[in-house]
Image (spheres, grey):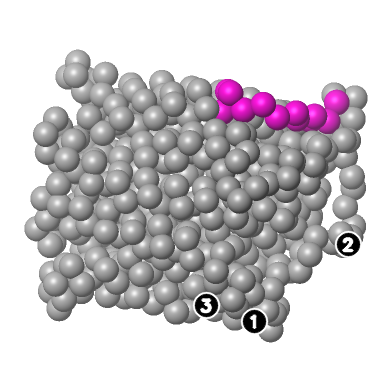
């Protein structure tokens, strides 16, 4: 497989200063990135639950409308994913992240403002979700591409473990906080918290001091040609192609579940809005455990084998979720759900670290965006399918169907070269 090199990449992160016993915590740039990402992660965790509660409780939305709301946040990947990858590789990634955080502050702040004025409608929620999704295409692409600029290649797994652990901790606190805010002040109050956290993230990202050297204008070869390079790299590489396909199937199932999970808990199991936040907090503990265990799993079993282990051992526990309130107590199903999330998140950390170490630095934005376009495009499909099935068959039956889809992602890994490997390969052409 051959690739066309582009103009000067950002200075290699291997030039980062030696670390002491505090590891990456001793590096100011990483600390600022971690604080910003963890804070905005807390707001996002609050906002995701709050947005669904606003739709279900305040606006009395149907299952299909909740699915449409979920899908709207991801539809922009269908249209902007490939373009965002090429553009992010042309621009300073930290500045992209700063602008995106400020735009998200404005978008999510508009929801409580409209609610307080008595003007909030389901149409506004969908539009906000759609526009925020478009902004997050660029934010996610830049975020996934900037880390190799800030830390050394050998520290990428540690950095991803720390960042994902922060996200997971935020996801534990966020749903419970959203439930409490909803009970005390109304569901829209959670979106106030979400908006404020993007301001904090903008301040942190804006204070990071790192030299970025995007390609000069004279070195550009046309947006379509640059997009094509990223797509060909992804399609031509058996490992990246496998991971993109695996993630697409997994996202189809996961988002089918998410489209009906709030309705299932409130209307089928009889959980209060505050209880919904508590359940999601329990589930998020699995995310924290998965992020914390990812490094140990990769070192003990190897990265490729560790990913298989996460998918084939942890994910099947999701089958206990549809039994909640019927064949199993909610608490048991919530713990099983948490174990499944543990496997999913640990696998995500391992796979994400591989992308960052394996892809050429000058092309990482385009390659990641090409992969994200494949796997994130499955999210709105899964959300709409889950919403439609929820309307036609009920939330519990939909959970059974979409949990089965999620588990079928393991077949993608078993049919790939990864099933015979202990660890992922090194970057092509690297020593």
In this view, 318 is above or below 232: below
Cα gap from disc 3 to disc 1, whole angstroms:
10 Å
Residue under the point 90% across and 25% down: 218
Local SS, label 2: loop
Rate crowding at label 1 as few (under 14), some (14 to 19) or many (20 or more) other CA atoms within 10 Å.
Answer: some
Local SS, label 3: helix
* 396 relative to 95 in the view: left or right: left
Cα gap from disc 2 to disc 3, whole angstroms:
28 Å
Residue under the point 30% across and 46% down: 173
Q: Earlier in the sequence, mark 1 or mark 2?
A: 1
Residue under the point 88% across and 62% down: 431
> Which numbered circle lies on residue 419?
1
Q: Which residue is mark 2?
A: 431
Q: Earlier in the sequence, mark 2 or mark 3?
A: 3
Give x and y (percent) for residue 66: 28, 46
Which numbered mark, 2 or 3, is in the foreground of this view?
Answer: 2
Residue under the point 56% across and 28% down: 205
Give 237 or 397, whichever is nearer the viewer. 237
Which numbered mark, 1 or 2, is in the foreground of this view?
Answer: 2
Q: Earlier in the sequence, mark 3 or mark 1?
A: 3
Rate crowding at label 3 as few (under 14), some (14 to 19) or many (20 or more) other CA atoms within 10 Å.
Answer: some
Q: What is the magenta range?
A: 205-216
Give x and y (percent) for residue 417: 70, 78
In this view, 249 is above or below 263: below
Queried whether the magenta region covers residue 187, the answer comes back as: no
* 233 relative to 265 in the view: left or right: right
> Which numbered circle lies on residue 309?
3
């Amino acid at each position: 497989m051959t690739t066309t090199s582009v103009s000067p990449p950002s200075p290699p992160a291997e030039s980062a200063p030696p670390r002491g016993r505090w590891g990456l915590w001793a590096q100011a740039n990483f600390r600022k990135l971690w604080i910003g990402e963890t804070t905005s992660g807390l707001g996002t965790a609050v906002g995701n639950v709050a947005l669904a509660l606003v739709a279900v409780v305040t606006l009395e939305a149907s299952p299909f409308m909740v699915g449409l709301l979920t899908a709207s946040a991801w539809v922009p990947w269908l249209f902007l994913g490939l373009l965002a990858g090429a553009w992010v590789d042309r621009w300073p990634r930290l500045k992209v992240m700063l602008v995106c955080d400020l735009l998200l502050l404005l978008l999510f702040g508009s929801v409580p403002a409209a609610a307080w004025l008595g003007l909030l409608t389901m149409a506004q929620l969908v539009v906000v979700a759609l526009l925020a999704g478009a902004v997050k295409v660029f934010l996610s692409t830049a975020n996934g591409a900037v880390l190799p600029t800030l830390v050394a290649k050998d520290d990428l797994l540690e950095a991803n473990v720390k960042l994902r652990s922060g996200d997971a901790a935020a996801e534990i606190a966020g749903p419970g906080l959203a439930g409490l805010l909803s009970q005390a002040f109304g569901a829209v109050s959670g979106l106030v918290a979400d908006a404020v956290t993007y301001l904090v993230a903008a301040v942190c990202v804006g204070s990071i001091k790192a030299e970025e050297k995007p390609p000069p204008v004279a070195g550009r070869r046309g947006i379509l040609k640059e997009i094509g390079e990223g797509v060909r790299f992804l399609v031509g590489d058996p490992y990246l192609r496998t991971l993109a396909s695996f993630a697409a199937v997994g996202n189809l199932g996961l988002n089918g579940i998410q489209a009906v999970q709030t309705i299932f808990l409130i209307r089928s199991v009889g959980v209060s809005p505050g209880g919904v936040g508590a359940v999601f907090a329990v589930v998020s503990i699995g995310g924290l455990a998965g992020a914390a265990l990812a490094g140990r799993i990769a070192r003990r079993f190897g990265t490729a084998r560790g990913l298989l282990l996460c998918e084939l051992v942890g994910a099947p526990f999701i089958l206990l979720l549809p039994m909640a309130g019927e064949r199993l107590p909610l608490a048991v199903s919530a713990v099983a759900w948490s174990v499944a999330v543990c496997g999913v998140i640990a696998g995500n950390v391992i796979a994400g670290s591989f992308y960052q170490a394996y892809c050429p630095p000058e092309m990482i934005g385009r390659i990641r965006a090409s992969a994200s376009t494949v796997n994130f495009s499955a999210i709105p499909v899964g959300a709409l399918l889950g919403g439609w099935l929820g309307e036609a068959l009920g939330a519990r039956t939909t959970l059974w169907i979409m949990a089965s889809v999620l588990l079928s992602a393991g077949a993608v890994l078993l049919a790939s070269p990864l099933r015979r490997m202990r660890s992922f390969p090194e970057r092509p052409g690297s020593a």
